[in-house]
Amino acid sequence: MASLATVAAVATIGSAVIGTGAQIYGGMQQQKASEIAARQERLAGKNELAASQREAEDRRREGRLIMSAQMAEAAASGAGAGEDAPTIMKILTDTGERVEYGAQATMYQGYSRRDDYFRSADAREASGSASFFGSVLSGLGSGIGGIGRGVAMLA
């Protein structure tokens, strides 16, 4: 029959082992949650970029419509709308440049927002990895301490 001290020592050691496993498992779950959140952030970043690409294309399409209307008005006025009308060509060139600048600015914003989401995802993944590593070290430290106390009780 085991003495009460032996039972207490075995229970202490068993508790230490279970506690170690629980801490490591908690760290693993935290790392998985961080990875899922990081994937969602990367997806949001990709969606931001895609939205900016659509918006930029819409700006270009609107610009082409505006330039077409400008050419039609110039032709209807009798001033001419071809390369032989330098004032009209200047207006069309200026309009085209402004439209393209707006489209490029929209694209830049999309790339910038995507990069912000990606950096946040990278940081979240690093935090999850650090949490897991920390839980392993903490769990091992607690487990070794508990085993040491249990062994000391047996001595």
Image (cartoon, rainbow, N blue to C red):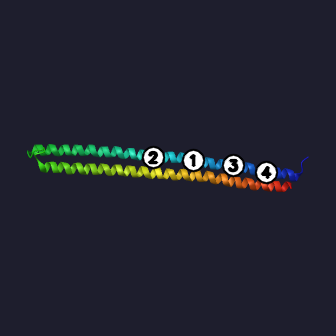
Looking at the image, which residue is at 32% across and 46% down? Answer: 56
Mark in front: 4 vs 3: 4
User: Mark 3 — residue?
Assistant: 22
C-alpha span from label 1 to label 2: 17 Å
| Most foreground residue, 138 or 47 | 138
| First reached walking from the N terminus: tag 3 or tag 2 | 3
Q: Amino acid at mark 1?
A: Ala
Looking at the image, which residue is at 70% across and 53% down? Answer: 140
C-alpha span from label 2 to label 4: 47 Å
Q: Amino acid at mark 3?
A: Ala
Marks 3 and 2: CB-CB under 8 Å? no
User: Mark 2 — residue?
Assistant: 44
| Left or right of residue 93: residue 42 | right
Q: Secondary structure at mark 2?
A: helix
Q: Quadrant of residue 82?
A: top left
Mark in front: 4 vs 1: 4
Q: Secondary structure at mark 4?
A: helix
Q: Position of residue 148 (x, y in %)?
A: 78, 55
Q: For label 4, count other residues whose C-alpha is less than 10 Å away and answer few (under 14), some (14-19) or many (20+).
A: many
C-alpha span from label 4 to label 1: 30 Å
| First reached walking from the N terminus: tag 4 or tag 3 | 4
Q: Position of residue 50 (x, y in %)?
A: 39, 44
| First reached walking from the N terminus: tag 1 or tag 3 | 3
C-alpha span from label 3 to label 2: 33 Å
Q: Residue 33's mark?
A: 1
Q: Amino acid at mark 4?
A: Ile
Q: Position of residue 117 (x, y in %)?
A: 46, 50
User: Mark 4 — residue?
Assistant: 13
Q: How many marks?
A: 4
Q: For label 3, count other residues whose C-alpha is less than 10 Å away and answer few (under 14), some (14-19) or many (20+).
A: some
Q: Amino acid at mark 2?
A: Ala
Looking at the image, which residue is at 74% across and 49% down? Answer: 17
